[in-house]
Amino acid sequence: MGPSRYIELSFCLLVAFVILAAISFLTLRPTLKEVRTEAQSEWASFLRQVKARNDLLPGLVEAFRGIEPGHGRLVEKLLEARSVSMRSTDPPTIVASVDEIDRCLAQIEKFAVTQPELNKYPPFAAHWDKVASMSRGVTETRRAYNYSARLYNRLLTPFPQNLLTVVLGFIPLKEYPAGRSFGDAD
């Protein structure tokens, strides 16, 4: 077998590989689009949940100040994190502020557990129930987004279609996992 035969055979194998990669990608493309759209929808839902909870925080802060005036720094951190999450469009910044809000709410929850008069204070109790419920929603939508992002990213990696995914605009999604946060169910 001469060198031209090897070149011809190599070219045929390369063409067959490209065709296999293209067919593999084309069969995966609808699933990629569906999962990416789902992840984008869940991220939008997460942002709506965060905004709704942010709208409730000033009422909670006022009720908390009404009975626990000595925790100015905690309240200040909570309102600062709220402000950052409301004006930012950068996902990592939004997630970092959500995490800070969760940490502040966990501290307020500790006060509520150790000081029964706080839980009995009607303005605080009413706001607290709404914020706690909304926080669970924030946590759940974040988990749903992370699940979809993880699934989407896994779909991008199999060989040989991964050779075409980035070229055709399918880039990995960033995940925003969290440890145990305030909104977690016990």
Image (cartoon, helix red, strand yellow):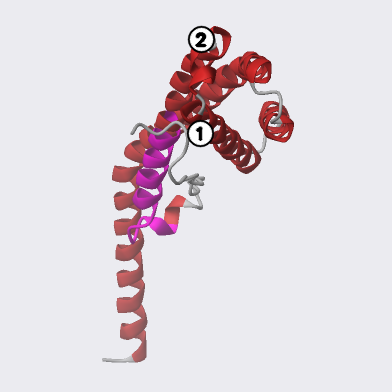
Q: Is residue 109 visible?
A: yes
1 or 2: mark nearer the eye: 1
Q: Is residue 36 visible?
A: no
Task: Tell me which corner region of the image, top left, top right, bottom left or bottom right, holds residue 164.
Answer: bottom left
Q: Earlier in the sequence, mark 1 or mark 2?
A: 1
- Outermost residue, bottom direction? 2
**Residue at 51%, 45% in the rendered image:** 169
CB atoms at circles 1 and 2 under 8 Å apart? no
Q: Amino acid at mark 1?
A: Lys
Residue 94's x, y, as percent? Answer: 62, 36
Residue in the foreground of this view, choosing between 141 and 103: 103
Q: Amino acid at mark 2?
A: Ala
Residue 56's x, y, as percent? Answer: 59, 15
Task: Identify whether 57 is placed above or below 31.
Answer: above
Residue 48's x, y, as percent? Answer: 54, 21
From which residue to which does the magenta span run? 141-163
Residue in the foreground of this view, choosing between 47 and 171: 47
Quarter in which the C terminus is drawn = top left
Residue 34's x, y, as percent? Answer: 37, 33
**Residue at 34%, 60% in the rendered image:** 160
Quarter in which the N terminus is drawn = bottom left
Q: Is 150 positioned to the left or the right of 182 in the image?
A: left
Categorize mark 2 by other alpha carbons within 10 Å: few (<14), some (14-19), many (20+): some
Check disc 2 and report the residue beneath it.
126
User: Mark number for residue 110?
Assistant: 1
Residue in the foreground of this view, choosing between 42 and 17: 42
Q: What is the secondary structure assignment of the residue under circle 1? A: helix
Categorize mark 1 by other alpha carbons within 10 Å: few (<14), some (14-19), many (20+): few
**Residue at 31%, 44% in the rendered image:** 28
